């Protein structure tokens, strides 16, 4: 077994892949929710570690508690870590009686908010085969949180300084807009009420004018998550996305959005573990070539959704992450906008795998600070105003 304790970037990947055993009752009680336990590794590397899934029983990693200090050990060595506290606002409710934790989920610098936990792919039996059902499915009530619920949630997040970016997402719903028409009042209300960055995860719209609309509404970042680059595997594992959106439309929308949004703010997920590493690398090259940031979450098997193309090891996938960092740098993609997120390894974090010992650049460190966040918000606002004015008279792809 390789030793990954000395490098936070590789340790994060290995922990996300293998999980951790929760032997200590105090630590076990700390882990809450279904998404694992958040820990802070050396060099302020944030990671969400699986701890409840079946595969974690075979993990070499466990947590050792010494007084008030915590260490991750693989049985041969150990490294000190910090347990990330559960946000205090989780236990509070909106004025309409909805728990904030039902609406929002904090993952590092991002707070994920899904105004309607529904995905029509499930109702059509064409859901993504890896999805564990994060959205409301067959027979469930059509829950839609009000704009007021969302605004109160965002206010609680920002008051507690729980994260820096509000990440709005939506499942599949029929329409040409990819879900933006539904998210529109939420985006507008948040940008009107708060000085914060807003990222939007939606499906590619059928017409590019909805991408222009997304930016004009106030979205600072947009994600159209292809998930799997290989065409045949995409059709097999993501039948809804393949049949009702299409792989070609994903790529077209990402390419267009990269011309509309600032450099480094358009992204797409490629799930590591659901296709051969070489295919993922091809997707990385395709995305970075058009100015899109590839985000590489690691597939987590769950009950009834045990999909794996081939057995994964960290040794197999580390070269994929190294390739990601090199491709991003080669294509001049700005990493200053990439914030820390516990559920995935960002290109910025991978620097430690390629350039041993090197941390964030001066500019990236600035943009991760509170002052830098305000600067990023201000620059984004100015750029949007200039671009929306210019867009009335010219082709957006020329800006």
Image (cartoon, helix red, strand yellow):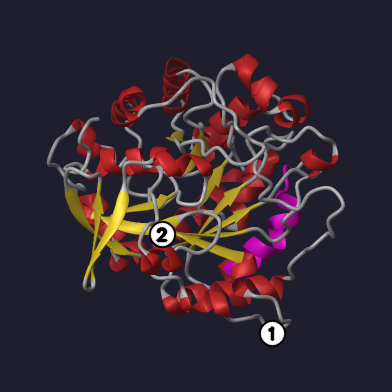
Is residue 125 in view from this perspective?
Answer: yes
The magenta segment is 178-190
Q: Please state if 186 lies on the left or on the right of 118 as rendered.
A: left
Query: At x 80% / y 43%, what residue is drawn?
Result: 120
Q: Where is residue 299 in the image (x, y as percent from the top left)?
A: 51, 36
Give the farthest residue toward the left: 357
**Gap between marks 1 and 2, in whole Å?**
26 Å
Up the image or down, 219 lies above or below 335; here it is below
User: Along the line of sight, which residue is nearer the eye, 259 or 371?
Assistant: 371
On-image quarter of the N terminus: top left
Label 1 residue SS: loop
| Location of mark 1 (residue) | 95
| Location of mark 2 (residue) | 109
Query: At x 51% / y 32%, what residue is drawn?
Result: 271
Q: Is residue 47 magenta?
A: no
Q: Does the magenta stretch include residue 181?
A: yes
Which mark is first along the chain, 2 or 1?
A: 1
Give the farthest residue toward the bottom: 95
Are circles 1 and 2 on residues that touch, CB within 8 Å? Answer: no
Q: Please state if 22 lies on the left or on the right of 54 as rendered.
A: left
* Dot label at residue 118: none
Up the image or down, 116 lies above or below 229; here it is below
Is residue 248 in view from this perspective?
Answer: no
User: Along the line of sight, which residue is nearer the eye, 138 or 255?
Assistant: 138
User: Along the line of sight, which residue is nearer the eye, 285 or 279?
Assistant: 279
């Amino acid at each position: 077994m390789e030793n990954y304790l000395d490098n936070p970037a590789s340790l994060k990947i290995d922990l996300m892949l293998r999980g951790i055993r929760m032997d200590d009752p105090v630590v076990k009680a700390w882990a809450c929710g279904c998404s694992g336990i958040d820990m802070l590794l050396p060099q302020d590397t944030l990671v969400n570690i699986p701890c409840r899934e079946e595969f974690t029983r075979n993990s070499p990693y466990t947590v050792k508690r010494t007084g008030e200090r915590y260490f991750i050990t693989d049985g041969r060595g150990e490294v000190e870590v910090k347990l990330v506290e559960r946000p205090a606002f989780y236990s509070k409710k909106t004025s309409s009686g909805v728990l904030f934790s039902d609406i929002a989920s904090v993952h590092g610098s991002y707070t994920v908010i899904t105004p309607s936990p529904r995905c029509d792919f499930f109702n059509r039996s064409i859901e993504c085969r890896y999805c564990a059902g994060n959205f409301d499915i067959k027979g469930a009530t059509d829950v839609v949180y009000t704009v007021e619920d969302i605004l109160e949630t965002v206010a609680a997040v920002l008051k507690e300084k729980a994260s820096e970016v509000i990440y709005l997402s939506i499942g599949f719903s029929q329409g040409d807009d990819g879900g933006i028409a539904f998210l529109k009042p939420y985006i507008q209300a948040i940008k009107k009420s708060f000085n914060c960055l807003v990222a939007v995860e939606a499906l590619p719209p059928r017409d590019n004018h909805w991408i222009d609309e997304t930016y004009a509404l106030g979205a600072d970042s947009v994600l159209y998550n292809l998930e799997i680059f290989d065409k045949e595997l995409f059709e097999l594992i993501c039948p809804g996305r393949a049949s009702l959106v299409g792989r070609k439309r994903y790529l077209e929308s990402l390419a267009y959005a990269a011309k509309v949004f600032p450099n480094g703010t358009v992204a797409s997920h490629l799930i590591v573990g659901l296709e051969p590493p070489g295919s993922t690398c091809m997707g990385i090259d395709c995305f970075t070539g058009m100015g899109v940031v590839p985000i590489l979450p690691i597939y987590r098997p769950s009950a009834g959704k045990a999909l794996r193309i081939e057995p994964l090891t960290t040794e197999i996938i580390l070269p994929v992450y190294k390739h990601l960092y090199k491709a991003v740098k080669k294509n001049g993609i700005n990493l200053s906008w990439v914030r820390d997120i516990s559920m995935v390894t960002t290109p910025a974090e991978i620097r430690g795998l390629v350039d041993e010992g090197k941390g964030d650049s001066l500019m990236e460190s600035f943009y991760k600070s509170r002052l830098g966040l305000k600067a990023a918000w201000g620059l984004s606002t100015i750029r949007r105003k200039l671009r929306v004015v210019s867009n009335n008279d010219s082709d957006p792809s020329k800006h």
